[in-house]
Amino acid sequence: MPTRTTLLLATLLLAVRCGGAPPPPPIPQDAATQAGSSGCRATARPLEPGTHRLRSGGLERRFLLSLPDGDGPHPVLLDLHGLGSNAAQQSAYGRLPEEGSRRGYIVATPQAAEGRMGWTLPHTTGPDDTAFLTALLGHLEQGLCVDERREFAAGLSYGAAMATALVCALDGRLSGVAAVAGLNIVRPCERRPPPTTIVAFHGTADRIVPYRGGHPFQDATGELRTLADLVVLDPVEQAAAGWANLLGCTGRTTTPLSARIRVRDWKSCPDGTTLRLYTIDGGGHTWPGPIEVPRLGTTARELDATRLILDAFDRAPSR
């Protein structure tokens, strides 16, 4: 029987080797629809904070929900966990539910399907997570007062891959995405999506999703090593440049923030969007901020990715 780790890499292998199919047709939009979703006018009891269940694709799916104060309409943020992790761990580690709700965001932290270690990327085999996340957004719009022009996704590692894949898979529904330690897992799509804010973070000493590209899981041995050698990731900077080219961003600059942190910006992106990459010299497969996970490498505690993600989303243009 294959080990859980082998299955994890097999999932990654499938995702990296597949893709390239055209995105689905755009979701119809009524030009007269105002920012507030139908949930702003609903008379039924709104959704409450806590754990929720939602059926999608014949499966019962789970998500955690954190809510801001006030009547809304509020922006929505999907917070996506990495391979082998779960919604509760992602909530605690990335702190987006806590900090996002303070900023006025509805934060939903979904869980991968039962028995799965991670998300099914678009155009790969498994539970249709693109459909699930689309249904989740619709569920939130119906049950809460949502600003439908301001919907976002963020994730860690494989969750980062899913978040960036949604830029194309949802064909412009998201105003922005954030990728921590995973921008280079999937390539940009072939067809240009609407202008979208993208902010990414990656450590140069990441041993799981290497910054300079090449084979993932660099410390793997045995069967896992054999599978890892079949996967070749693009360098992170090449991935960022690919998104710049796709989105039409120009004027690249690189600025040191400290002795080991530099930020790469594209000064001119369409419609006031942002494309930004934070590089942490010596950083591991970690979420920059106050929480350390030593087995994943060094954490840049002086850089608060959570705050910077929310700053970028605050500035992102509405749809």
Image (cartoon, grey):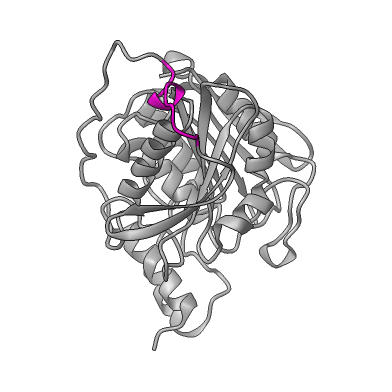
The magenta stretch spans residue 152? no
Residue 42 appears in view = yes
Q: Main secondary structure of the magenta part?
A: loop
Q: Residue at x 30, y 10 (%)?
A: 32
Q: Image check: 254 left or right of 174?
A: right
The magenta stretch spans residue 37? yes
Q: Which residues are magenta?
A: 35-46
Residue 116 location (% of width, % of height) = 42, 67
Q: Is residue 246 above or below residue 21?
A: above
Q: Is residue 136 above or below residue 27?
A: below
Q: Image check: 37 left or right of 124?
A: right
Residue 154 location (% of width, % of height) = 52, 41
Residue 143 location (% of width, % of height) = 44, 34
**Considering depth in this image, is 2 or 242 the residue closer to the camera?**
2
**Considering depth in this image, is 304 or 252 the residue closer to the camera?**
304
Q: Residue at x 46, y 18 (%)?
A: 318
Q: Is residue 51 above or below residue 253?
A: below
Q: Which quadrant holds residue 107?
A: top right
Residue 152 location (% of width, % of height) = 48, 33
If the image is split into quadrants, where does the C terminus sit?
top left
Q: Residue furthest bottom?
A: 1
Residue 228 appears in view = no
Q: Image check: 167 left or right of 316?
A: left
**Considering depth in this image, is 259 or 25 the residue closer to the camera?**
25
Q: Residue at x 37, y 46 (%)?
A: 187
